[in-house]
Image (tube, rainbow, N blue to C red):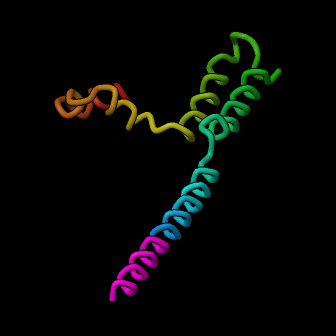
């Protein structure tokens, strides 16, 4: 009977060890698949650089057109509405629709 209890304890410890190892390997795979924030932003930054260095968009007379292209690109990557809500915090709910749209 004592031998069976020891065998059962050893078996349970072995199973926990295997599960711990499998969990560690799974976690390592998830960590490797996580994209670095810099890598996530790289395409956006490259697009901004191409807009800002485009010879056809240089000069003060092209400033508005350049700004529109930058904002269009930024709107694809950032949720300005959500950022406005988070920046204003509790105050956001007290604002009228017009005021919310102003901050958005």
Q: Which residue appears at 73% of the width and 26% of the height?
A: 49
In which quadrant of the rendered view does residue 51 lie? top right
Q: Which residue appears at 65% of the width and 16% of the height?
A: 63
| In magenta segment, residue 3 | yes
- Provide the major secondary structure of the magenta segment: helix
Q: Is residue 45 left or right of residue 87?
A: right
Instruction: Judge whether 68 appears above or below 17 on screen.
Output: above
Which residue is at the front of the view, 7 or 68?
A: 7
Instruction: Judge whether 39 appears above or below 9 on screen.
Output: above
Q: Which residue appears at 57% of the width and 29% of the height?
A: 71
Which residue is at the front of the view, 96 or 8?
A: 8
In which quadrant of the rendered view does residue 29 lie? bottom right
Residue 99, given in percent of the width and then of the height, sits at 27, 26
In which quadrant of the rendered view does residue 61 lie? top right
Residue farthest along the left direction in this orientation: 94
Residue farthest along the top direction in this orientation: 60
- The quadrant of the rendering that contains the N terminus is bottom left
Q: Which residue appears at 62% of the width and 40% of the height?
A: 36
Q: Is residue 1 left or right of residue 90?
A: right
Residue farthest along the bottom direction in this orientation: 1
The range drawn in magenta is: 1-15
Residue 93, given in percent of the width and then of the height, sits at 20, 34
Which residue is at the front of the view, 86 or 62?
A: 86
């Amino acid at each position: 009977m004592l031998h069976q209890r020891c065998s059962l304890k050893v078996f349970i410890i072995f199973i926990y060890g295997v599960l711990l190892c499998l969990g560690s390997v799974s976690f390592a795979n998830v960590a490797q698949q996580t994209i670095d924030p810099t890598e996530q932003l790289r395409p956006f930054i490259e697009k901004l650089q191409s807009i800002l260095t485009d010879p056809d968009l240089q000069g003060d007379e092209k400033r508005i057109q350049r700004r529109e292209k930058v904002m269009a690109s930024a709107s694809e990557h950032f949720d300005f509405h959500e950022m406005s809500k988070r920046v204003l915090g509790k105050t956001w709910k007290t604002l009228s629709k017009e005021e919310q749209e102003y901050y958005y």
